[in-house]
Image (tube, helix red, strand yellow):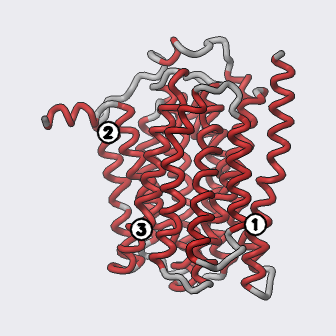
């Protein structure tokens, strides 16, 4: 029995999902509470909170493409291990921070770790999957991400209530180290010995920059990342402003993650049966934008949870369709680079969202008006992007025809 379990855990897809869960669980354990920690424990302004989150995104923008290129050249294992190690180090440093600037530095290290991990593990999932099962495989993979996001906030809230912020951050750093052990113990999957039988070998790396399909994926990634990071910074501060405690903050983000997780597998099957999936990105972005605006229409706790539930569903649909779009348009020789660019757009959104949201809030004398306008301005970016995706899609298929 133990031997069979060991064999199952060492299968590439299973081990990748376990590693993914651990890393994103560690992320979700502390991420919703960092804005409150900075504001209440370190005396940071809302703008400084936004800067900290934006630094993570900025580092990601600078390193995403090099990380994807490195992943294609040296394999997926080393970047995944290095990224997990940097992430663990940033959490440990955060636990001893006494100044907002130290949190900003920690987020810079976290950005480097996240981009190394993200580009390689996303490409690795594509490497071990056939094209006709990409949606299902990425559905399982993204379900592992959402499971981590679902379990993390509530667990983080309970730990913070029992242990305090600093001890929780330090304990969380253990999880990426466990992930490293699992990656080291897993036999590397040889890139290119399975998937190339299913993918067009004529697709050259240079064509990814001219592919309308891939561009729609990248643009979608930027927009949903902007909303995800911006709401991730403003929502905890907003509900704290309304008088809710850490447990409600955890429940809020757990609700978002659970609704997103339940949508992953059905959306994956739907995407596998559809050739043109840009419409799924558009509907996902629309749902995220409308729920972001709806978030400030009422201070009722039930309403806030409902809006975050819709936000999670929209994110799930946009994320799944964008990721599969990129995976379909690439092969094992350039998927890491394409995912690296995808990470660059993701981190660009992570940079712009918190900065923009915190800037709008800080520019108002009234916090209530500031939060309202901050959420609306962020949502406007996604709403504007939807017509752009429609135009690109129509041009792409007209050229192909």
In the rendered structure, find residue 154 and report the number of the disc placed on it. Answer: 3
Pointer 1 residue: 356
Q: Is residue 143 left or right of residue 299?
A: left
Q: Position of residue 115 (x, y in %)?
A: 56, 47
Spatial CA span between label 1 and label 3 = 27 Å
Q: Which quadrant would residue 308 be assigned to in this image?
A: bottom right
Q: Residues within 10 Å of mark 2 (few under 14, many from 20)?
A: few
N-terminal-most mark, 2 or 1: 2
Q: Position of residue 44 (x, y in %)?
A: 61, 82
Q: Position of residue 53 (x, y in %)?
A: 62, 65
Pointer 2 residue: 184
Q: Residue at x 75, y 75 (%)?
A: 372
Q: Nearer the viewer, mark 2 or mark 3?
A: 3
Name the element at disc 2: helix
N-terminal-most mark, 1 or 3: 3
* 13 is higher (above) or lower (below) than 19: above
> Viewer-proximal residue, 89 or 202?
202
Quadrant including the C terminus? top right
Name the element at disc 1: helix
* 146 is higher (above) or lower (below) than 321: below
């Amino acid at each position: 029995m133990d031997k069979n379990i060991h064999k199952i855990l060492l299968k590439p897809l299973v081990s990748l999902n376990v590693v993914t869960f651990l890393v994103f669980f560690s992320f979700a354990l502390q991420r919703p509470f960092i804005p409150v920690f900075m504001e209440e424990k370190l005396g940071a302004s809302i703008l400084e909170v936004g800067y900290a989150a934006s630094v993570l995104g900025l580092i990601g923008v600078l390193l995403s493409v090099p990380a994807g290129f490195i992943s294609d050249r040296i394999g997926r294992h080393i970047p995944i291990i290095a990224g997990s190690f940097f992430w663990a180090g940033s959490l440990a440093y955060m636990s001893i921070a006494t100044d907002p600037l130290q949190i900003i530095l920690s987020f810079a290290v976290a950005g480097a770790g996240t981009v190394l991990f993200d580009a390689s593990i996303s490409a690795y999932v594509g490497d071990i999957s056939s094209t006709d099962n990409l949606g299902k495989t990425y559905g399982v993979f993204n379900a592992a991400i959402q499971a981590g996001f679902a379990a993390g906030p509530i667990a983080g809230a309970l730990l913070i209530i029992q242990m305090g912020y600093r001890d929780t951050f330090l304990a969380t750093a253990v999880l990426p180290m466990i992930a490293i052990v699992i990656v080291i113990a897993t036999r590397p999957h040889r890139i290119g010995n399975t998937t190339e039988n299913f993918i067009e070998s004529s697709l050259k790396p240079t064509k990814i920059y001219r592919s309308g399909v891939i561009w729609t994926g990248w643009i979608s990634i930027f927009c949903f990342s902007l909303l995800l990071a911006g709401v991730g910074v403003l929502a905890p501060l907003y509900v704290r402003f309304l008088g809710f405690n850490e447990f409600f903050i955890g429940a809020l983000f757990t609700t978002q993650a659970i609704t997103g997780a339940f949508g992953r597998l059905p959306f994956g099957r739907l995407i596998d049966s559809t050739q043109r999936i840009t419409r799924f990105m558009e509907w996902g972005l629309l749902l995220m934008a409308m729920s972001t605006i709806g978030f400030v229409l009422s201070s009722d706790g039930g309403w806030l949870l409902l809006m975050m539930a819709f936000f999670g569903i929209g994110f799930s649909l946009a994320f799944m369709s964008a990721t599969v779009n990129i995976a379909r348009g690439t092969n094992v020789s350039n998927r890491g680079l394409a995912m690296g660019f995808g990470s660059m757009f993701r981190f660009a959104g992570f940079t712009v969202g918190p900065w923009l949201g915190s800037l709008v809030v800080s520019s108002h004398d009234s916090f209530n008006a500031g939060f309202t306008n901050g959420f609306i301005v962020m949502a406007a970016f996604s709403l504007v992007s939807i017509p752009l995706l429609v135009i690109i899609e129509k041009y792409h298929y007209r050229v192909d025809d």
